[in-house]
């Protein structure tokens, strides 16, 4: 573009040329007398202006090609400044941006052509490509693998790049440890947390997800990194109404926690942007199967898979959803849910009430399909709800509590997912509300080194909005206790409940005992039963039995030994008949060790299992690569698998034995005071072989959760202490 000054100069010159041309074409006037020559007459300003306009009209109009990059609206810019201000600054400067993706099985499933990293075809790769196209003139996306070189990108375009560093971890429990070790090997700017899929399938509690998310957020912000949270996708196995609900608990927790921390949350399982209700389908009996058939076409449904992963096409849609949520937020749907209440109406009966409003200017038929979370079963309801434009209606849904042990009340809230369908759109709405008139919150996660008795920290919460008088009763091991509580509005009280633990030195290593607790108030009585797993601290040189997962008798035993240089485990496989499978392996062993110091080990943390596999024949077993945080949060080293020895052998009598040794130097954060009962290791061992599974301890906590482990004291005279875990 010319400046105004240059434009006027050019137009002025053109105008003079135009006037000269006009004068040349005018008819000749009579010549003046020679004796009186007339002075030359200059054109007046209006004539010059008219001539200039005429010439300008003949000039070609300037065409400026539209810029599709860095074209943010004021609303989009404000959104970026709220969630990712540092990243926005780097992108506008066309600087390299690195994204660490902490993902579980949601990262799997995408297929790429030979020579192309599959991560580029995943939702994270698609999202990064859209960012590069938005902000960079040229450039692209490149995948970084820890310990390796930069992988080739799809198109070799010179320019700034967005780097993606994928870090796989099967649970959000270990996300902070994975970030602080592998994730920090590069120079990340953004952490993209894509967890909750495997946690939902494993039944990880809302409290565990919340604690792990806070740890991840603290770790990221400690390095001044920005965070994006991508919620998990639903599953669609048979029965679909239960499978769809599995991941909604972690998803709703992550959504709440992200909002509180002012972190961007994107629901990658938003059905409103993945599916369209097929035309012609009417009623829940037709709509639900049609939607499920369409959704299942977006998933990899291999029978050998325990998790349904997204197809390449669905990864592309998920990447688009994530980019849209960053740029402008999730689109609205033609309904709105509000004023939800979940109320106990009798022993084992729950009523959910909420309002549904039609937010469009046309009439609407809303189909409501309550999903089936663990421990609950919806009763028959009328799912069809006609609504006039702008109208709202109260909906009541009834549930039966099928198993109080499955009630997700670790935070006093009910999380009830509802599939809502209206017109072509559908979405799973997660209704999260306190349980009325009261709830029972289990504050205790795991308690280590308990001696004569244990307090489960059960807290009664008043959610009625008025004062509440309640009575409670409990039974543990045949011992009954009762009590009363008086609660103010929104008040709460921890029950003074003490459970006696075994004091007999010959007590079994592991027991699972039911704790029955019932609460009565306002004419309503409800049980909140739980199982408690108690495991006795084991010592060195003590042969302890492993439990068989099938409940049948087991003769497999574990013994631990230690000296100043190494830690040893001996597994006697009595009664186990090993046979090589089609892959050439006869057994798999998962060994978790929490080797933090004593004080740290009593706090939440994560480990990563050592995976050991081998053939049926005698010989050395194979140790898989070891995660840097394998021995507990805070570890960040490169561990050589060859330094860990594992060997299968046979005795003269035909017995089989697996021996494992680890160097003490690998457990460098542990005090290693042999003979001291407080010099402890968190321990669990799971063995699969001969068609059966065996374990030292097992709970609903994720296997890599430090609070899922038992205790090994580095002494041959262990104390009579227990690990107690609420199930």
Image (cartoon, helix red, strand yellow):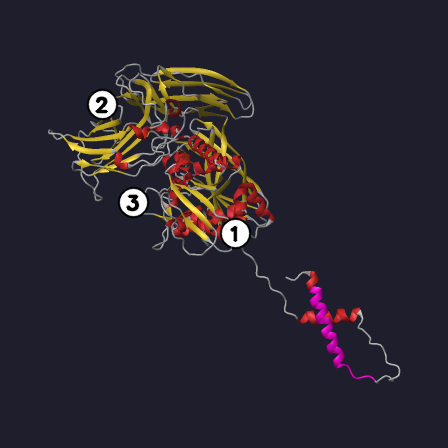
First in residue order: circle 1 vs circle 3: 1
User: Is residue 22 rendered magenta in the image?
Assistant: yes
Residue occupying image coordinates x 46% and y 28%: 411
- Give coordinates of residue 186: x percent, y percent: 42, 42
Percent across and percent down for residue 41 are 82, 75
Which span of residues is magenta-colored? 7-29
Please tell me how crowded label 3 is: few (under 14), some (14-19), or many (20+) other residues with Cα within 10 Å. few
Magenta segment's dominant SS is helix
Give SS at disc 2: loop
The answer to whether residue 274 is left or right of residue 85 is left
Quadrant of residue 723 in the image?
A: top left
- The residue indicated by pointer 3 is 304
What kind of element bears circle 3?
A: loop
Q: CA distance from mark 3 to mark 2?
A: 36 Å
Would residue 614 be counted in the magenta stretch? no
Q: Which residue is mark 2?
A: 543
Q: Nearer the viewer, mark 1 or mark 3?
A: 1
Label 1 crowd (10 A; few <14 / some 14-19 / many >=20): many
């Amino acid at each position: 573009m010319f400046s105004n000054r240059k434009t006027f100069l050019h137009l002025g010159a053109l105008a003079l040329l135009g006037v000269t041309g006009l004068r040349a074409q005018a008819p000749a006037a009579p010549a003046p007398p020679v004796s009186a020559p007339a002075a030359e007459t200059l054109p007046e300003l209006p004539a010059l202006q008219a001539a200039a306009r005429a010439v300008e009209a003949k000039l070609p109009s300037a065409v400026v090609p539209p810029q599709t990059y860095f074209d943010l609206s004021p609303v989009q810019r404000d959104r970026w400044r709220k969630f990712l201000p540092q990243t926005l600054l780097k992108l506008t400067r066309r600087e390299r941006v690195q994204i660490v993706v902490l993902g579980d099985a949601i990262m799997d499933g995408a297929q790429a052509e030979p020579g192309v990293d599959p991560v580029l075809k995943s939702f994270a790769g698609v999202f990064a490509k859209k960012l590069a196209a938005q902000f960079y003139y040229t450039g692209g996306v490149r995948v970084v693998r820890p310990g390796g070189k930069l992988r080739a990108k799809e198109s070799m375009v010179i320019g700034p790049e967005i780097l993606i560093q994928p870090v796989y971890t099967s649970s959000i429990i270990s996300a902070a440890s994975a970030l602080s070790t592998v994730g920090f090997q590069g120079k990340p700017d953004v952490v993209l947390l894509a967890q909750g899929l495997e946690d939902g399938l494993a039944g990880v509690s809302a409290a565990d997800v919340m604690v792990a998310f806070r740890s991840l957020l603290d770790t990221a912000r400690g390095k001044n990194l920005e965070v994006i949270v991508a919620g998990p996708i639903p599953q669609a196995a048979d029965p679909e109404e239960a499978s769809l609900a599995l991941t909604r608990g972690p998803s709703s927790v992550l959504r709440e926690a992200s909002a509180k921390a002012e972190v961007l949350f994107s629901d990658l399982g938003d059905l409103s942007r993945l599916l369209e209700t097929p035309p012609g389908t009417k009623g829940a009996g037709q709509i639900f199967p049609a939607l499920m058939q369409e959704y299942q076409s977006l998933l990899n449904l291999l029978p050998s898979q325990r998790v349904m992963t997204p197809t390449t096409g669905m990864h592309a849609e998920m990447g688009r959803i994530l980019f849209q949520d960053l740029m402008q937020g999730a689109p609205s749907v033609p309904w709105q849910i509000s004023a939800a209440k979940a109320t106990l109406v009798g022993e084992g009966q729950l009523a959910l009430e909420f309002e549904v409003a039609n937010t469009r200017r046309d009439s609407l038929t809303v189909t409501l399909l309550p999903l089936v979370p663990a421990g609950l079963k919806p009763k028959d309801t009328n799912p069809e709800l006609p609504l006039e434009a702008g109208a709202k209606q109260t909906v009541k849904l009834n549930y039966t509590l099928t198993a109080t042990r499955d009630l997700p009340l670790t935070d006093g809230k009910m999380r009830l997912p509802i599939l809502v369908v209206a017109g072509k759109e559908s979405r799973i709405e997660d209704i999260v509300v306190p349980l009325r008139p009261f709830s029972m919150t289990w504050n205790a996660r795991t308690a280590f080194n308990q001696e004569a008795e244990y307090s489960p920290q059960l807290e009664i919460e008043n959610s009625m909005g008025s004062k509440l008088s309640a009575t409670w009763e409990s039974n543990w091991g045949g011992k009954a206790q009762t009590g009363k509580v008086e609660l103010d509005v929104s008040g709460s009280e921890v029950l003074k409940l003490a459970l006696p633990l075994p004091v007999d030195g010959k007590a079994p290593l592991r027991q699972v005992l039911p704790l029955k607790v019932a609460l009565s108030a306002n004419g309503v009585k409800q049980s909140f039963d739980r199982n408690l797993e108690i495991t006795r601290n084991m010592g060195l040189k003590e042969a302890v039995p492993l439990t068989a997962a099938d409940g049948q008798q087991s003769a497999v035993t574990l013994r631990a030994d230690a000296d100043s240089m190494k830690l040893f485990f001996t597994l006697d496989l009595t009664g186990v008949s090993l046979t090589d499978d089609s892959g050439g392996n006869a057994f798999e062993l998962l060994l978790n060790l929490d080797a933090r110091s004593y004080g740290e080990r009593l706090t939440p943390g994560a480990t990563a299992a050592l995976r050991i596999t081998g053939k049926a024949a005698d010989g050395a077993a194979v140790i898989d690569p070891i995660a840097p945080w394998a021995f507990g949060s805070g570890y960040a080293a490169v561990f050589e698998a060859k330094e860990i020895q594992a060997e299968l052998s046979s005795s003269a009598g035909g017995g089989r034995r697996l021996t494992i040794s680890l160097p003490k130097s690998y457990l460098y954060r542990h005090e290693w005071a042999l003979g001291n009962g407080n010099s402890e290791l968190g321990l669990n061992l799971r063995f699969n072989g001969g068609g059966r599974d065996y374990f030292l301890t097992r709970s609903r906590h994720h296997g890599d959760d430090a609070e899922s482990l038992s205790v090994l004291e580095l002494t041959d005279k262990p104390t009579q202490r227990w690990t107690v875990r609420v199930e």
